Structure formats: structure tokens, C-alpha cells
Image (cartoon, rainbow, N blue to C red):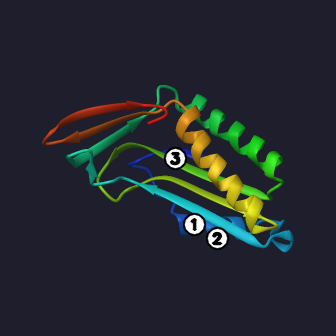
């Protein structure tokens, strides 16, 4: 299991890296499903042609602990074997990776539901600030956006 909040200029971890890591779990023999999610930067947003996106959090360590708590709760709730999460912060261009999740579980149903819950919980319950910068203006979205 990997859970990290990584600056955009640090070494990248990809969805393929998470899959490789999760397949090395001691629980792989009891697993029949891996679901992944890769959230990326959109190039267009509400009549805006995005030039760059800046994603920040006021306290990186607190954010990491909040994501770890979400993962722990979801693992128990859905009885899945492993969950890995990477969330990038910093400055990004369209198409760049922002948020990666990989879930390993015994069956597809609970594995997919666990993935969905991690995605939504991190989006709405963890404090991030997203600044979208374009030729048409500047837009700021706080957690839940």
C-alpha cells in the first residue's frame, strides 16, 4: 500500500506503478479485481481555456493523515485487500496527473464501490485549494469543487 501527497516537481508515480505495487501484495492470491482511477487536469473549464492549474493544501502532513484515515475506513467498510493513493500538489498543465487510486479486492463489486468512495471522500473531505488560470480569468475552488 502506498499513500503519498507529492509535489508536482518530485519524481512521478504513475497508475502503472500503483498496479505493479499492488500486485506484489501478499493478498494477491485472495484477490480477483483491481480498479484504478487517474484524475487529470482538464484543458477547458466553464468557457475557460486553461493555461495552468495550481493545487495546494495548507498542511501537507495533515492532508496525508486525512487520506490515510479515508483509506483505512474504506478498506474496513468494503473488506478490500489494498488501497493505494497518490495526490499531487503544485503547478500543472492540461493532461497532467493529479490524483491516482488503485484498489485490490476479492470481487469486483466491493472493489469498485471502495474506489468510488475513496475518490469522492478525498474530493469533498480533504482540504485542497484549486486555482484555475486562463486568458479569460482566474478561478479558485476550495475542497468539494
Of 59 and 71, the residue lying toward us:
71
Question: In what element is the residue under mark 2?
Answer: helix
Q: Is residue 51 left or right of residue 33?
A: left
Sequence-first tag of 1 and 3? 1
Asked whether the viewer can see residue 134, the reply is yes
Which one is nearer the viewer's eye here, 75 or 59? 75
Quadrant location, the N terminus:
bottom right
Which numbered circle lies on residue 20? 2
Q: Could you say where residue 127 lies in the image, as x and y percent from the top left?
A: 51, 30
The label nearer to you, 1 versus 3, is: 3
Query: Residue under circle 3?
Result: 87
Place residue 15 in its image quadrant.
bottom right
Residue lying furthest right: 30
Q: Position of residue 92 (x, y in %)?
A: 32, 49
> In the image, is 1 to the left or to the right of 123?
right
Secondary element at image label 1: helix
Residue under numbered circle 1: 17
Where is residue 50 drawn, in percent x and y? 23, 48
Label number found at residue 30: none
Q: In the displayed structure, does residue 38 sit left or right of residue 93? A: right
Q: Is residue 139 above or below residue 83?
A: above
Between marks 1 and 3, how big is the CA–CA gap? Answer: 14 Å
In this rendering, the answer to whether 59 lies above or below 37 is above
Q: Are marks 1 and 2 in contact (CB under 8 Å)?
A: yes
Near-viewer residue (136 or 6): 136
Amino acid at each position: 500500500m502506498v499513500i503519498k501527497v507529492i509535489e508536482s516537481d518530485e519524481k512521478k508515480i504513475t497508475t502503472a506503478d500503483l498496479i505493479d505495487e499492488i500486485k506484489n501484495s501478499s493478498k494477491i492470491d485472495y484477490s480477483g479485481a483491481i480498479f484504478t482511477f487517474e484524475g487529470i487536469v482538464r484543458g477547458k473549464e466553464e468557457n475557460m481555456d486553461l493555461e495552468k492549474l495550481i493545487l495546494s493544501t495548507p498542511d501537507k502532513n495533515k492532508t496525508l493523515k486525512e487520506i490515510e484515515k479515508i483509506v483505512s475506513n474504506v478498506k474496513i467498510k468494503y473488506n478490500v485487500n489494498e488501497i493505494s493513493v497518490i495526490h499531487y500538489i503544485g503547478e500543472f498543465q492540461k493532461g497532467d496527473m493529479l490524483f491516482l487510486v488503485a484498489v485490490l479486492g476479492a470481487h469486483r463489486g466491493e472493489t469498485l464501490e471502495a474506489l468510488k468512495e475513496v475518490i469522492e471522500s478525498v474530493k469533498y473531505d480533504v482540504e485542497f485549494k484549486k486555482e484555475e488560470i486562463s486568458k479569460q480569468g482566474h478561478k479558485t475552488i476550495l475542497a468539494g469543487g
